[in-house]
Image: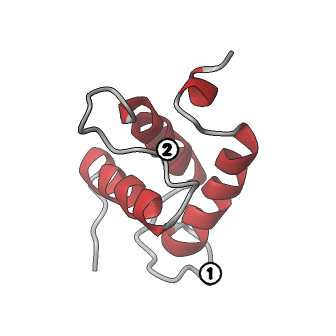
């Protein structure tokens, strides 16, 4: 069993989630809030976020790839990759 599955995250959700985050923050022409995130940054930040889930009783839980998950991944990318939120 994968670590993602243990955290309540389906791999099919993660694939969709990467594209969802990219449509908001990615290096794509029609990004809603373009902060210059590459696909590789999105994948790394998503992995870090999922690793942080359910570690402690008050840790965040996976919301099915919703806007809260997206914003948490955005914050990780801003912090880890020094991207600028405008």
The residue under the point 58% across, 54% down is 64
| Of residues 34 and 7, the one drawn nearer to the viewer in this rendering | 7
Dividing the picture into quarters, in which one does residue 20 lie?
Answer: bottom right
Q: Which mark is residue 53?
A: none
Q: Return the disc, 1 or 2, that comes first in the chain's sequence.
A: 1
Q: Residues within 10 Å of mark 2 (few under 14, many from 20)?
A: many
The residue indicated by pointer 1 is 29
Relative horizontal placement of residue 24, taking residue 28 as reference (left or right): left
- Mark 1 to mark 2 CA distance (whole Å): 22 Å
Screen quadrant of the C terminus:
bottom left
Q: Residue furthest right?
A: 12
Task: List x then y, in percent, for residue 46.
Answer: 49, 44
In the rendered view, would you say 10 is above or below 76? Answer: above
What colouring style does the render use?
Answer: secondary structure
The residue under the point 62% across, 81% down is 29
Q: Residues within 10 Å of mark 1 (few under 14, many from 20)?
A: few
Q: Nearer the viewer, mark 1 or mark 2?
A: 2
**Element under label 2?**
helix
In the rendered view, would you say 56 is above or below 67? Answer: above
Task: List x then y, in percent, for residue 7.
Answer: 52, 31
The residue indicated by pointer 2 is 46
Q: Residue furthest front?
A: 57
| Of residues 18 and 26, the one drawn nearer to the viewer in this rendering | 18
Task: List x then y, in percent, for residue 14.
Answer: 65, 46
Relative horizontal placement of residue 31, taking residue 45 as reference (left or right): right
| Of residues 8 and 45, the one drawn nearer to the viewer in this rendering | 8
The residue under the point 41% across, 63% down is 68
Task: List x then y, in percent, for residue 4.
Answer: 59, 29
| Of residues 36 and 11, the one drawn nearer to the viewer in this rendering | 11
How many marks are shown on the rendered structure?
A: 2
């Amino acid at each position: 069993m994968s670590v993602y599955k243990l955290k309540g995250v389906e791999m099919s959700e993660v694939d969709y989630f990467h594209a969802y985050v990219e449509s908001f923050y990615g290096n794509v022409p029609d990004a809603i809030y373009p902060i210059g995130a590459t696909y590789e940054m999105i994948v790394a930040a998503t992995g870090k976020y999922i690793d942080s889930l359910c570690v402690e009783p008050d840790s965040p839980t996976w919301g099915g790839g919703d806007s809260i998950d997206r914003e948490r991944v955005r914050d990780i990318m801003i912090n880890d990759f020094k991207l600028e939120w405008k």
